[in-house]
Image (spheres, grey):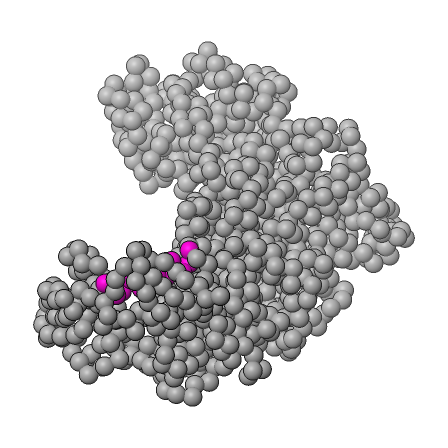
Amino acid sequence: MDKKKTIKSLDLNYIPSAVEEEVLKGWKENETFEKSVEARSASNSYRFYDGPPFVTGKPHYGHLLGSIVKDVIPRFQTMKGKRVERVWGWDCHGLPAENKVEKELGINSKKEIEELGIDKFVSACKSYVGNVSAEWEWYIDHIGRWVDFKNAYRTMDMPYMESVLWVFKELFDKGFIYKGKRVSLFCPRCSTPISNFEVAMDNSYKDVTDPSVFIKFKLKDQDASILAWTTTPWTLPSNFALGFSSDSDYVQVEHHGENLIMAKDRLKEVLGDEYKIQREFKGHELEGKEYEPLYHYYPSNNNDYHLYSANFVSMEDGTGIVHIAPGFGEDDTQLGKEHGLSMAESVDDTGMMDPIVEVAQGKYFKGADKFIITDLENRGLMYKSTKITHSYPHCHRCETPLLYKAQTAWYIDIQKVKKQLKDTNSDINWVPEFFKHGRFELGIDSAPDWCISRTRYWGAPIPVWECVCGEKIVAGSISDIEKLSGQKITDLHRPDIDRVTLKCPKCGQQAKRVPEVLDSWVEAASMPYAQVHYPFENEQKFKNNFPADFITEYTGQLRAWFYVTHVISNLLFDSIAFKNVIVTGVIQGNDGRKMSKNYGNFPDPKEAIEKYGADSLRLYLMGSPIVLGQDIAISESDWANELKTTLMLLWNSYKYFVTYASLEDWELKVEFTTRPTALDAWILTRLDQTILDMDESLSSYQIPKSVAALKSFVDDLSTWYIRRSRDRVGPGSLNIEDKEIAYTTMATVFKVFLRTSAPIIPFISEYLYRHLTGEESVHLEDWPEVNDRSVIDTELLSKMSQVRKIAEMGNASRKALGIATKQPLSQINVSGNFSSLKDEVELLQLIKDELNVDEVVLIDSKEQGIEFDTQITDQLRAKGKARELVREIQEARKLAGCRLDERIDVELPDWPKESEEEIKRKTLVDNLVKGDTVKIKRHP
């Protein structure tokens, strides 16, 4: 530090957009971000992974929220001496991009895509991704996030995709990947499987009204019918069994001349009071009973059309007996496997009913309901048909109702590793902590095998070639493919990769690639490896950066990116992929749902950022419950309030300091030549306390606590320290020694605090720090060091809290009495437990100055109270008049445009002669002269 550096005044009022644009310009011109990374040793790295966003449209507040968290922690760790590389990533593949391109091209089905040509469609996807990604940089820059865009990885790039092929082969060779026929969620509009977690992550369930039908299944060995229930009549042509609860009570009743069998607990709900119980029995007596099928469209075997115990049957709805269609439902499929039931697929990949189902031939599956209901009614097999409103899964991208459908696909066997996934979860620090054994671990418990194949076009290929002889060839690299095909591979996308055939090592014939592409979540989960093209290069760099020290995303990723990344790292390396994770809540859109580009339910944040600034957005979001996993709706008023209550206070406090320090050509120094006063010592120990509080909270990923500490300090600095120091500085202050202490204290506070505030509010911290010190950047500085809490003067903090409590009560009392603070009073009696202040001359003087009293009398009492001596003597009235005149003269100086250090003469009608020198000193007046009104006379 140049000890002869003098303080410059700050002419600007705080206009966030102007300040932030100037700071951004400096960062770019000076390459400050790059310098902050390179200044730290690679041997002392802090590893951060950035979950790649989908490249679809402009970012919304949810993206900005995540990006701010991704900036705060790396900035802090950088200032703590760590090398924190952060590279941007783009998630390019999958349905999000495909659906956007389909809309642009006016395409509504896979059939239309193939008519257009896969090559043209994939080319359009590439173009779309390239065009959209350019829009993000403005937003990321203007919220103050530092990230390397130049070297951003893209999941569509060849090196990245090659690493994904390696991941697939590794998992295949270890026996974790299999091809099989299972029931899983399927989108008939996109004609592709959908993962359970894709639907769960953003709660893509909607309330819909569906049929609720009660069907009579005639038993073969007795004169009775089973009364079963379903909300999916379209699945009835595929019925092969009925399920019941073996431990529950069932009854056979006579009802309107028919014998019906159902659960006893559901009688009144379903039949009302019009029934006669013929017999009661336990459910297990139904085991194996045979009934007559409703339809005969599909082949069957001897195990079909019987009743079987099913542990998923509920007594909360229906009849306690459910219809089983093994081709449509996870539970149904499992029961079908256990009992060797047939499986019929009566709905094709576009959601249309199988032509063999004559009763609903050519109908969309949802539209088939009414035809099947009518048919069963006409045949006397429908007991009743009503409506039910329930939650039903929809495609998270096109919003089409999904169906559980049997399909041949590629899966990761999650069941093999569930215990390991839960065991290694214990090594992860979750913030908030309740997600650890809550939604994340419960998600592992309930997770089905992960369907990783998509019958789509824009994605990394499943690297499996199948030969007619039954041999499967799995390629884990481009060189594998080139070696076995004899072709040069220039693109791994469809349709290029589809044209590549491999020579079968078993029979010598040409094997063809399976048509599916990978679930884009496999690519996102492979980010730790693929972003550095591991294992094909950067082996040491990968090892040095795995696992991550920190990641963050919103709650939806508990069953998505967090989950899949955890799965892949465990399967590859028996290791966690990340050590610490912050889970944010969801910012709700203007329709109450999660903000989503897919829903289009949010305004462009750009206008508000330009109006209120990024620092206020950062304070607002980082201090809110959303960083503790709770959901919020964006409040523009709360955002604006951060600007007023914190940032403007900080700016104006700093401006006050430099305005007067510059007037007096004060040389910047942070070393005291005289013992600080109690007020100075207090703000300095508050500074140390704030540094420690913020260090501890940011080190433990508790960002809202750090924001609370920051805001509390700014409030203390402005509303108490600066407020009580106003008479100590400036040309009107005659106590040179005290003035020096005040300036030195303020310089120390701002120089240190701006380093502390930098990770949270990087723009204003940068601007003011540069202005104060002349240094290149606060973000190239180290975090302020405070040894430990033993340096905190807790006794002084406690006493100052008492002083401020008395001041608060006193100001409230004056207001209630209607006596202005400018009117001096002789005495205040303070009751309560304030005995520790009795000998504290400086602290008592603060009370006198704040409440404008001559004496403070402390009275020990269990009850707190304030009592002013309200008798106003002529002498006190004269002092009050003097104070009022000081205010009037200061206002007149402003109106006349006087400089702060400009000396003047003043005309006054009258003034208290005993206060003349005080008035002149406080207002920089040389001569007071008689006049009709308050009038400023400036010297020539």
Is 126 in the magenta? no
Please tell me which residue is depicted at 10% across the width and 64% down the height of the picture. 871
Q: Nearer the viewer, residue 303 or 194?
A: 194
Q: Nearer the viewer, residue 579 or 152?
A: 152
Residue found farthest to the top:
378
Do we see residue 807 in this rendering?
A: no
Residue found farthest to the bottom:
673
The reply, left or right, for residue 806 in relation to residue 728 is: left
Total of numbered circles in the picture?
A: 0
Please tell me which residue is depicted at 31% across the width and 38% down the height of the picture. 248
Please tell me which residue is depicted at 46% across the width and 59% down the height of the picture. 897
Please tell me in which quadrant of the rendered image residue 260 appears.
top left
> What is the x, y in percent for residue 660?
45, 71
Do we see residue 636 in this rendering?
A: yes
> What is the x, y in percent for residue 735?
36, 81
Numbered range of the magenta stretch: 881-895
> What is the x, y in percent for residue 468?
80, 43
Quadrant where the image shows the N terminus = bottom right
Q: Residue 187, relative to residue 897: is it above or below?
A: above
Q: Residue 920, relative to residue 176: is it above or below?
A: below
Is 885 in the magenta? yes
The reply, left or right, for residue 168 in relation to residue 244 is: right
Please tell me which residue is depicted at 55% across the width and 49% down the height of the picture. 610
The reply, left or right, for residue 61 in relation to residue 133 is: left
Q: Nearer the viewer, residue 583 or 205?
A: 583
Q: Residue 674, relative to residue 437: is it above or below?
A: below
